[in-house]
Image (spheres, rainbow, N blue to C red):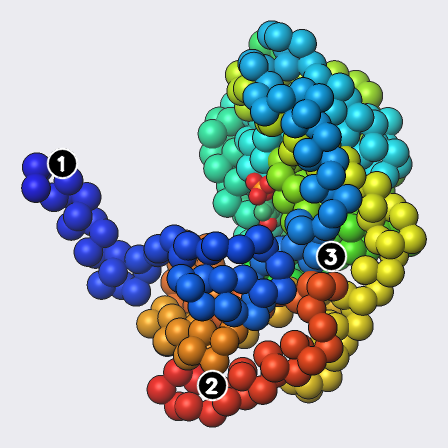
Amino acid sequence: MNPFDSELQERLASLSGQGLRRELRRVDSPQGPHIVLNGQTLLNFSSNDYLGLAGHPALQEAAIAAVKEFGTGAGASRLICGSLKPYHELEETLANFKGTEAALSFSSGYSAALGTIGALMGSGDIIILDKLVHACIVDAARLCGAKLRVFKHNDLSDLEALLRWASDARSNKVDPGRNARPRALVVTESVFSMDGDSAPLRDIVELKSKYDAWLMLDEAHATGLYGAHRRGLAEQHGVQNRIEIQMGTLGKAIGAAGGYICGSRVLIDYLGNRARSFVFSTAPVPAAAAAAAAGVRLIQAAEGEERCRDLWERVAQFRAGRALHASTELSAIIPIPVGPEEKAMAAAEALRRRGLFIPAIRYPTVARGQARLRLTLSAAHRQSEIGQALAALEAVQSQPAIQA
Ligand SMILES: *Cc1c(COP(=O)(O)O)cnc(C)c1O
């Protein structure tokens, strides 16, 4: 092996030694309640396809029609070679769904966060993050050069202390480059990706207003699932109109791929000019936009309401079977804490032998020593399949060596 490869080999060995080595597991079937993984058919509790739309015929047909009409490649960035119809239709559909003036789509949620935070914030500004926000938000905040502060997860008094500090730090300062006061931005998730708990949105909105900060809310795990129109947790908490930047992904409940920002017309126009991950990146395949638009329309329709109801029924069934008590908000994400990485891996392996795919989540996705099984429920699961999951978990958890 050459020196380059052998150095990387050593680094991988070190990951293996810590129980942190990851591997791609090949799947030869569509995502759905059953997947064929390394030749074995498994009951799938690993995906964020909460409403079962990733395999839905309406999305497939929309994607196929878009391929036939627009081909497979976008050709360039939308600002360079023109902006194909499916993106505009998607963005109109998203704005209508979210009840905002406008929307902008990106090739992923990750690039939406990167582009948006980088466009809005820079050196001299202050970004305040919940401790458990997604890696894309942390990366974006680090990259943009703003001062970064982190508040304890969902801790309002910690957040307020940081907002007060930021407000003092910002007063009397005028950034000569922009001839404006430095800005403060709070970023949090509505439903947290790894724990399924939710942010106290009303209080957070009050606080950011009180201290004149902006709020960016990542609804990746709430869009399509919460609120009377399934817009997300902000709708459920009645604070949609008080959030400057609403972000999400098209790849979870919406069943396609891509990311979005919803907000005012001027925010969207500004991002179209300044979000580097939008400006300097080839547009996604038009079929992805068409599938996402079909997914959003489906969520808005009676079928979306029905699927959402099915999902919450499955969640209730699962929670009753585990004697879990509701904390605040219900979620389709069920974390089963294990602790040591190796133990979580052994538990996931034991579950696979029983026909269930429930992934072990480890550092750096969660903190070291806080590995867990992360089970996600979908409207596409049948009642009997929830029963199978409950039985398998019970069997595996009774084995002391791999107790979850
Ligand atoms: C998945 C996820 C993202 C990233 O979205 P992608 O479309 O997968 O890039 C961002 N934020 C949160 C909270 C997520 O769970």
Q: Nearer the viewer, residue 12 or 127?
A: 12
Does the image show residue 306?
Answer: yes
Q: Amino acid at mark 3?
A: Leu
Q: Position of residue 234 (x, y in %)?
A: 81, 48
Q: Nearer the viewer, residue 214 or 92?
A: 92
Disc number placed over residue 51 in the picture, else none? 3
SS assignment at label 2 = helix
Disc number placed over residue 297 in the picture, else none? none
Q: Earlier in the sequence, mark 1 or mark 3?
A: 1
Q: Earlier in the sequence, mark 3 or mark 2?
A: 3
Q: Amino acid at mark 2?
A: Val
Distance from Cα at disc 1 to Cα at disc 3 = 45 Å
Circle 1 residues within 10 Å: few <14, some 14–19, many ≥20: few
Q: Position of residue 369 (x, y in %)?
A: 39, 68
Q: Position of residue 339 (x, y in %)?
A: 42, 73
SS assignment at label 3 = loop
Instruction: Mark 1 and mark 3 in contact? Answer it, CB < 8 Å.
Output: no
Is the distance from the Cβ of mark 1 to the nearest ligand 1 atom less than 8 Å? no
Disc number placed over residue 396 in the picture, else none? 2
Distance from Cα at disc 3 to Cα at disc 2 = 27 Å
Drawn side of residue 49 relative to residue 403, left or right: right
> Residue drawn 26% across and 56% down?
15
> Residue drawn 66% across and 42% down?
256
Q: Which residue is mark 1?
A: 4
Q: Nearer the viewer, residue 86 or 129?
A: 86
Quadrant of res 65: top right
> Residue drawn 81% across and 60% down?
307
Q: Position of residue 282 (x, y in %)?
A: 55, 19
Q: Amino acid at mark 1?
A: Phe
Quadrant of res 178: top right
